[in-house]
C-alpha cells in the first residue's frame, strides 16, 4: 500500500470486559502491559538513535559524515574575518637580518653603459624568512690529565655529568624526539624516520623509548610541584575518559587550570581513582565538572556544573521530546552567559539583573514540573524503581543542583562551561586514535607525566623544546604557587 493505514485503538466497555471469561480478561491485561512496555522500549531506542554530539555527551566522531553540525552559538551581526581593532600577526621585516644579499645593476637601462664599478645605494629591501639547512653539531669532550710537579701524582679531569659514554645523542636531539611523540603523537617509528630524513640522525625506536623512560623519572620533581600548584589554584577543571591499557578499560583523569595540566591513569573511574590522583580530596577551590555523581563526594569543594552539557541535553529534550520548557531554559542560560560577558568590566551583575534571571529560572522549572505532572507514569524497571523520562531527570538536576548551575552569575572567575577540561582531555582521545592503546600500565604513566609537562609548558608560554631539554638534563622547569583567595565558606 502506498499510503499509511491508520489503525484505531480498540476499546472495550466495562460491561463487555466484565462479561468475558476470567482467562480472557487476564490475557487482555497481559497484552496491555506488554504493549505499554514495548512502547516505552521503542521510545527509549528512538531516543538513543536521535542522540548525537549536539544534544548529548557523545563525541563528534560518532556522528558520521551525513549529519550536519549545528552550533549553539547565536547569529552575530559581525562580518566574517578580523574585526576592527584586531592586531594582526603577519610577518614584518627584521632589523638585523642574518644574511644580506645585494643585487647590483651591471648595465645602464638608458644607454647600456657599464655601471658595474659605480657606487650604488639601497633603493628597496625585501626579506625572506627561511630555515637553514639542518646540521648535526658534533661536540667532542676531552679530559686532560696532569702530573703534579710536587708529588708526582697524576690527576685526570672528570667528564660532565651528562657525558656518560664514548658517543651519545645530546639533550636537544632527545627532546625533539619526545616533542614529536608526546606533543604531536607521531608514532615512534615515524619519529625515527623524521630525524633520519631531516637531520641524518639514525635514532632507533629503542633509544626513543629510553628517552621517554628517562624523562618520566626526571620529571618527578615537576609533578610534585605541579600538584602543589594546582591545589593552590582558585578554579580547577576536572574530566576523565576511557582508554585501553593492558587489554582492559582504564581511565585517564585530568585536573587542569588555565596555567597547568595534570594527567593520571587509573584502572578505576570513580572516587577511588580520584583519591589516588590526590587533587580533589585536598582541593578547596571551585571545581568545574559534569554532573557525574562521584564528584559530589568531596563536600569541601565548591562545585560548578558544566552548562555546555546542560545545553546539549536541553536541545535533545526540546527536539526529541517536544518539551517547551527545555527551549526556554536553554535560551535563559545562553542569555545569562551573554549578560555576564557584558558586565565583565564591572566585575558583578546588578542585583535587579540577578533577581530577574533567578525569577525566570524558577518559573521555567515550575512550568516543567507541571508539564511532567500531567504525563502518565512510566512502568517500573526491574529494580522496582519508578523510571523517569529524560526531561524529568534533567529537570530534577537543574532544581537540586541549582546553585552549582548558576554559580557563574555570582562569581565571574567561575566559567560557564568545562571547556578547558574537555580541551585538555581531548588530547588523550587523539593519542588513542593514533596508538590504539597502551601496552603496559607504566607506558600510560609515562605518557601522562610527559604530557602533563608539555601541556603545562604550552600554557606557561615556555619554549617546549628547551623545556624538554632541561628536563632531560635533570633540571625540569617548575611552577610557582599562587595564593588561594577562595575561602571554603564562600564556595560550598
Image (spheres, rainbow, N blue to C red):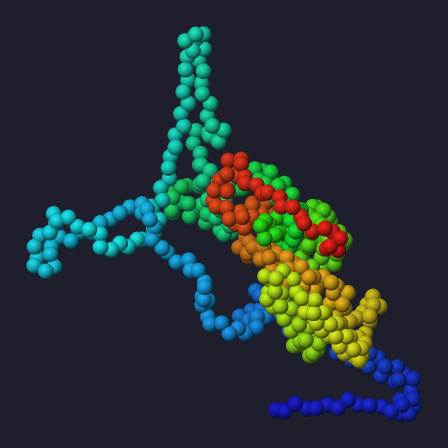
Q: Quadrant of residue 229?
A: top right
Q: Position of residue 323 (x, y in %)?
A: 70, 78
Q: Where is residue 164 in the image (x, y as percent from the top left)?
A: 48, 29
Q: Where is residue 264 in the image (x, y as percent from the top left)?
A: 64, 48
Task: Please give the name of the residue rendered at 73% of the width and 48% of the height, measured from the top-left corner.
Answer: 281
Name above or below for residue 392 compared with residue 200: below
Name above or below for residue 115 compared with residue 59: above
Would residue 60 be visible to someone looking at this image?
A: yes
Q: Where is residue 450 in the image (x, y as percent from the top left)?
A: 56, 45
Task: Please give the name of the residue rendered at 48% of the width and 31% of the height, measured from the top-left corner.
Answer: 162
Q: Out of 414 and 380, give the one closest to the viewer.
A: 414
Q: In which quarter of the image is residue 480?
A: top right
Task: Please give the name of the residue rendered at 72% of the width and 69% of the height, measured from the top-left corner.
Answer: 355
Q: Out of 226 and 485, give the one closest to the viewer.
A: 485
Name above or below for residue 407 compared with residue 216: below
Q: Quadrant of the N terminus?
A: bottom right
Name above or below for residue 361 compared with residue 111: below
Q: Out of 78 and 308, give the one closest to the viewer.
A: 78
Task: Please give the name of the residue rendered at 80% of the width and 75% of the height, measured from the top-left corner.
Answer: 378
Q: Quadrant of the C terminus?
A: bottom right
Q: How many labels does the image show?
A: 0
Q: Out of 58 and 432, give the one closest to the viewer.
A: 58
Would residue 429 be visible to someone looking at this image?
A: no
Amino acid at each position: 500500500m502506498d499510503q499509511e493505514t491508520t489503525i484505531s485503538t480498540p476499546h472495550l466497555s466495562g460491561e463487555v470486559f466484565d462479561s468475558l471469561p476470567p482467562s480472557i480478561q487476564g490475557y487482555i491485561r497481559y497484552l496491555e502491559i506488554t504493549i505499554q512496555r514495548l512502547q516505552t522500549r521503542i521510545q527509549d531506542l528512538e531516543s538513543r538513535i536521535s542522540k548525537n554530539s549536539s544534544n548529548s555527551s557523545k563525541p563528534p566522531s560518532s556522528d558520521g559524515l551525513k549529519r550536519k553540525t549545528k552550533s549553539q552559538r547565536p547569529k552575530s551581526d559581525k562580518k566574517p574575518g578580523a574585526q576592527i581593532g584586531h592586531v594582526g600577526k603577519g610577518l614584518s621585516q627584521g632589523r638585523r637580518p642574518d644574511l644580506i644579499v645585494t643585487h647590483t645593476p651591471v648595465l645602464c637601462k638608458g644607454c647600456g653603459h657599464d655601471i658595474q664599478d659605480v657606487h650604488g645605494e639601497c633603493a628597496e629591501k625585501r626579506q625572506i624568512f627561511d630555515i637553514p639547512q639542518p646540521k648535526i653539531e658534533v661536540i667532542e669532550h676531552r679530559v686532560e690529565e696532569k702530573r703534579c710537579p710536587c708529588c708526582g701524582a697524576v690527576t685526570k679531569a672528570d667528564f660532565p655529568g651528562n657525558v656518560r659514554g664514548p658517543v651519545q645523542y645530546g639533550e636537544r636531539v632527545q627532546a625533539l624526539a619526545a616533542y614529536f611523540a608526546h606533543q604531536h603523537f607521531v608514532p615512534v617509528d615515524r619519529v625515527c624516520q623524521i630525524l633520519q630524513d631531516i637531520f641524518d640522525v639514525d635514532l632507533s625506536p629503542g633509544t626513543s623509548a629510553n628517552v621517554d623512560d628517562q624523562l618520566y623519572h626526571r620529571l618527578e620533581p615537576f609533578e610534585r610541584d605541579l600538584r602543589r600548584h594546582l591545589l593552590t589554584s582558585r578554579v580547577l577543571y576536572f574530566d576523565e575518559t576511557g582508554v585501553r591499557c593492558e587489554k582492559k578499560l582504564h581511565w585517564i583523569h585530568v585536573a587542569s587550570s588555565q596555567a597547568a595540566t595534570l594527567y593520571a591513569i587509573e584502572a578505576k573511574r570513580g572516587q577511588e581513582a580520584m583519591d589516588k590522583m590526590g587533587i580533589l580530596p585536598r582541593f578547596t577551590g571551585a571545581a568545574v565538572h559534569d554532573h557525574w555523581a562521584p564528584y559530589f563526594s568531596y563536600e569541601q569543594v565548591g562545585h560548578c556544573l558544566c552548562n555546555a552539557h546542560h545545553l546539549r541535553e536541553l536541545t535533545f529534550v526540546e527536539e526529541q521530546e517536544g518539551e517547551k520548557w527545555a527551549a526556554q531554559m536553554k535560551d535563559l542560560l545562553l542569555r545569562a552567559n551573554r549578560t555576564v560577558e557584558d558586565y565583565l568590566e564591572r566585575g558583578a551583575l546588578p542585583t535587579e539583573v540577578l533577581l530577574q534571571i533567578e525569577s525566570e529560572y524558577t518559573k521555567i522549572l515550575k512550568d516543567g514540573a507541571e508539564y511532567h505532572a500531567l504525563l502518565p507514569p512510566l512502568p517500573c524497571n526491574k529494580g522496582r524503581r519508578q523510571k523517569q523520562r529524560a526531561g524529568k531527570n534533567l529537570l530534577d538536576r537543574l532544581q537540586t543542583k541549582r546553585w552549582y548551575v548558576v554559580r557563574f552569575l555570582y562569581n565571574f572567575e567561575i566559567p560557564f562551561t568545562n571547556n578547558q577540561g574537555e580541551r585538555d582531555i581531548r588530547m588523550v582521545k587523539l593519542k588513542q586514535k593514533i596508538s590504539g592503546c597502551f601496552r603496559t600500565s607504566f607506558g600510560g604513566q609515562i605518557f601522562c607525566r610527559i604530557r602533563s609537562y608539555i601541556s603545562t609548558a604550552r600554557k606557561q608560554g615556555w619554549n617546549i623544546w628547551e623545556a624538554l631539554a632541561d628536563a632531560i638534563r635533570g633540571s625540569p622547569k617548575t611552577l610557582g604557587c599562587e595564593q588561594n583567595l577562595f575561602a571554603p565558606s564562600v564556595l560550598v
